[in-house]
Amino acid sequence: MSRLPKDFLWGGAFAAHQFEGGWNEGGKGPSVVDVLTAGAHGVPRQITETVEADKFYPNQVASDFYHRYKEDIKLFAGMGLKCLRTSIAWTRIFPNGDELEPNEEGLKFYDDVFDELLKYGIEPVITLSHFELPLHLAREYGGFRNRKVVDCFERFAKVCFERYKDKVKYWMTFNEINNQMDTDNPLFFWTNSGVIVKEGEDPKDVLYKVAHNELLASAKAVIAGKEINPDFKIGCMVSHVPIYPYSCNPDDIMAAEEAMRQRYFFADVHCRGHYPSYALKEFEREGYDIGIEEGDAEILAKGTVDYIGFSYYMSTTVKADVHNDNTGDIVNGALSNGVENPYIESSDWGWAIDPVGLRYTLNRFYDRYELPLFIVENGFGAIDQISEDGQIHDQYRIDYLKKHIEQMELAVNYDGVDLMGYTPWGIMDLVSFTTGEMKKRYGMIYVDRDNEGNGTMERCCKDSYYWYKQVIKSQGENL
Ligand code: BG6
């Protein structure tokens, strides 16, 4: 297998809310995930009104990076990571989201984290909003339904850009902003935008209004960031689950083509700076007024992104003549014509394992936008067992990552895709986003903590840790 370029950003990824803990320390306020209970495969997480004393909220302590960042970063350095992707918890900087002055203690925490990373030559790659909207903005303002929240986000972005302009070069605005296209699952609306759809509302109508505000917020952040430091690279971040046609029946092909618009809608605006024609037709057909005000078009056009960060875990398949009622399902959600792909196996959580889909995705994105790409999430959520020798022999995770890296290398070295880097998800075990479980582990480093919050929090390197170290050292040759 061929090597990747010397400056390729091999790294790892996590998000503040799933890894950091310290949810009410250092002046931090509650965010939308601090009121999310734990669920399980097939059991949705509940959104509670406030933090209730008798409920367990797994993100509040998470993997305790807040207190252990020095030892954790040392472990990352031991792997030879070139970059680390994480997010800045908005509520550490603005506890309620609508303050005019930031919380110094929160800013200082990230100064310390970034300094520690840079000490080892690890480049921070930072998402501004990874499902971490202040709870106050969700409850009192209605989240991104409200245009005032655009100003709050812009203020937060500017403060971060100013403060860390000499420490962070790579940024992303909103994590997996397109999850909320699946309007049947309340988790996505809540975590993306702090929105709860009210009875009688058309969720798609709400979605596009919210989307416009968020796309505007992203564009404003890009514009502000470039003024603060023209060398910044600011990207978007979308979840990409390609949708295949079940067969070569032209109806299946067209069904997949139409369904893919759900995946592309946000990236189309982030990258091109205007709404795509299929969306304009839908707004017209359905009578949606998405709330575009004077000057917005210019902001969207000016605030386009430098690169596309995306997550890739799985693919899905549609068949034109299927009409099932699986909407709301976490995997095939919103695909009322979704079917199983007979050529692909799935993980214990029903996520289709499809390495070729990654090469396909890279090619589709690159053809569509001709912008640099960054795989900022990819990984295998599995149940790990501690063996008799006290170690975790996670060959299944190595197999998954190896096959995906092979396809990624083909995309770069054979297809000519411009790829900036690769940061496998959950480099150290953390709380699962969709289920709130700890046992759905992605890490190459084990964290001793279970679904109920028991454990010592001790860290232990899995076999994949040593494997990935070799991969990085050999620039992707030694798989
Ligand atoms: C993406 C998110 O959806 O996938 C992460 O950006 C998330 O926050 C990851 O953790 C994996 O999903 P899950 O539900 O298995 O944790």
Image (cartoon, rainbow, N blue to C red):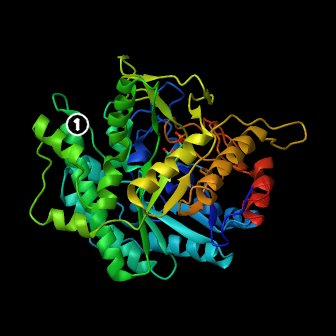
Q: Is residue 252 above or below residue 171?
A: above
> x%, y% of residue 395?
78, 40
Which residue is painted at 42% across and 75% down in the image?
104
Relative to 250, is 212 above or below?
below
Q: Along the line of sight, which residue is nearer the eye, 174 or 276?
A: 276
**Front one among 26 and 183:** 183
Q: Please, which residue is most extreme toward the right here?
A: 389
Q: Nearer the viewer, residue 44 or 289?
A: 289
Q: Amino acid at mark 1?
A: Lys
**Image position, residue 48 (x, y; %):** 37, 36
Residue 476 image position (x, y, % from top left): 72, 59
Q: Residues within 10 Å of mark 1 (few under 14, many from 20)?
A: some
- For residue 337, which quarter of the picture? top left
Q: Considering only vertical position in the picture, is 196 above or below 270?
A: above
Residue bearing mark 1: 204
Q: Residue at x 62, y 37 (%)?
A: 440
- Say what secondary structure mark 1 lies in: helix
Count of labels shown?
A: 1
